[in-house]
């Protein structure tokens, strides 16, 4: 998607009556008023002769070169795109688990290509949301929820970046033909499995509005927080026993660093879910009346 906030064009002034109608607050459970309500004098003052006064300024949200009348419609589309990006990260984690087993060079290229696509999408989404904030078109509630959405975007993007970084470590291992012990690789696979499950649980909770099983999410959160420490201890134990080569500690430490940061992002997403960040807020928005 191509996102943009720009000044309204004179040829688009006819849209103002639609924007005005969509801006009318309608309490939940109350029927929407007739569109003729915008003909009332107290409402017409907002759009009559718009553009003829020096201080008349109008901004519109544009997605894929199509003007979106209300921020609600734009935010709904953006939320759907973030969930699409989240699905891409899930696929990257699945392919990464496969790469840790097979070391198939084809998977390296696939994961890195997914990472580049994800980065481009998330960059466009974050820029668009920042423009919505600076344009001042969001209500207080919309701004609060959108700020939380931007935090989620940051962790989703970070998960993709770290999956790509971890792929680079494994690609270097394949290219230079060095090997970690089978115990080390098994630890990595178990950690990736924990992270994948935690990521899935957290994103599912965010999409549903709250965790189905809060205790399960908390237990998984605690396990993920301990991954880095447990893997480092196990690595040093193997080095001391001669099961792992000390000279390979540098690339393995980079691998551990990626796992640790991925775990942190999963914990952040879980915390957002526990704080009632809710994709449903955006997905349930009405595009029109």
Image (cartoon, rainbow, N blue to C red):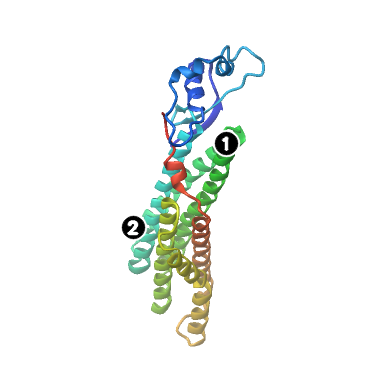
- Work out which quarter of the rendered image holds the N terminus and state it: top left
In percent of width and height, residue 79 lies at 45, 43
Which one is nearer the viewer's eye here, 171 or 133? Answer: 133
Which one is nearer the viewer's eye here, 91 or 167? Answer: 91
Q: The residue tagged with tag 2: helix, strand or loop?
A: helix
In percent of width and height, residue 156 lies at 48, 53
Q: Which residue is mark 2?
A: 106
Distance between mark 2 and mark 1 Cα atoms? 47 Å
Local crowd at mark 1 within 10 Å, few (<14), some, or many (≥20)?
Answer: few
In the rendered image, the residue lying farthest to the front is 30
- Work out which quarter of the rendered image holds the C terminus and state it: top left
Q: From the viewer's perspective, is residue 159 above or below residue 234?
A: above
Q: From the viewer's perspective, is residue 47 above or below residue 180?
A: above
Q: How many marks?
A: 2
In percent of width and height, residue 78 lies at 46, 40
Local crowd at mark 2 within 10 Å, few (<14), some, or many (≥20)?
Answer: few
The residue positioned 43% from the left and 70% from the top of the image is 191
Q: From the viewer's perspective, is residue 41 above or below residue 247?
A: above
Q: Are discs 2 and 1 less than 8 Å apart at CB?
A: no
Q: Which residue is mark 1?
A: 139
Name the disc covering residue 102, or none: none
In percent of width and height, residue 59 lies at 56, 26
In the rendered image, the residue lying farthest to the right is 54
The residue positioned 53% from the left and 38% from the top of the image is 128
In the rendered image, the residue lying farthest to the bottom is 241
Q: The residue tagged with tag 1: helix, strand or loop?
A: loop
Asked where in the image residue 56 lies, by quadrant, the reply is top right
Q: Earlier in the sequence, mark 2 or mark 1?
A: 2
Mark 2 or 1: in front is 1
Q: From the viewer's perspective, is residue 91 above or below residue 138?
A: below
The residue positioned 43% from the left and 56% from the top of the image is 205
């Amino acid at each position: 998607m191509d996102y943009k906030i720009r000044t309204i064009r004179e040829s688009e002034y006819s849209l103002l009556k639609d924007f005005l109608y969509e801006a009318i607050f309608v309490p939940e459970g109350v029927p929407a008023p007739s569109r003729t309500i915008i003909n009332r004098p107290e409402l017409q003052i907002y759009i009559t002769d718009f553009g003829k006064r020096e201080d008349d300024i109008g901004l519109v949200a544009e997605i894929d070169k199509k003007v979106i009348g209300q921020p609600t419609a734009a935010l709904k589309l953006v939320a759907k795109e973030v969930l699409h990006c989240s699905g891409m990260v899930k696929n990257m984690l699945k392919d990464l688990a496969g790469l840790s087993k097979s070391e198939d060079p084809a998977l390296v290229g696939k994961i890195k290509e997914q990472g580049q696509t994800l980065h481009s999408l998330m960059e466009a989404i974050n820029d668009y949301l920042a423009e919505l904030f600076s344009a001042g078109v969001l209500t207080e509630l919309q701004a609060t929820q959108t700020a939380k959405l931007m935090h989620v975007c940051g962790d989703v993007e970070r998960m993709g970046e770290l999956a790509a970084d971890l792929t680079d470590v494994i690609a270097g291992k394949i290219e230079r033909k060095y090997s970690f012990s089978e115990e080390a690789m098994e630890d990595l696979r178990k950690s990736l499995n924990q992270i994948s499950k935690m990521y899935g649980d957290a994103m599912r909770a965010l999409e549903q509005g709250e965790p189905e099983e809060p205790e399960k999410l908390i237990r998984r959160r605690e396990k993920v927080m301990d991954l880095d420490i447990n893997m480092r201890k196990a690595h040093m134990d193997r080095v001391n026993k001669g099961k792992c080569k000390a000279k390979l500690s540098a690339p393995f430490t980079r691998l551990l660093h990626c796992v640790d940061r991925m775990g942190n992002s999963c914990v952040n997403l879980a915390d957002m879910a526990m704080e009632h960040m809710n994709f449903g807020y955006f997905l349930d928005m009405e595009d029109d009346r």
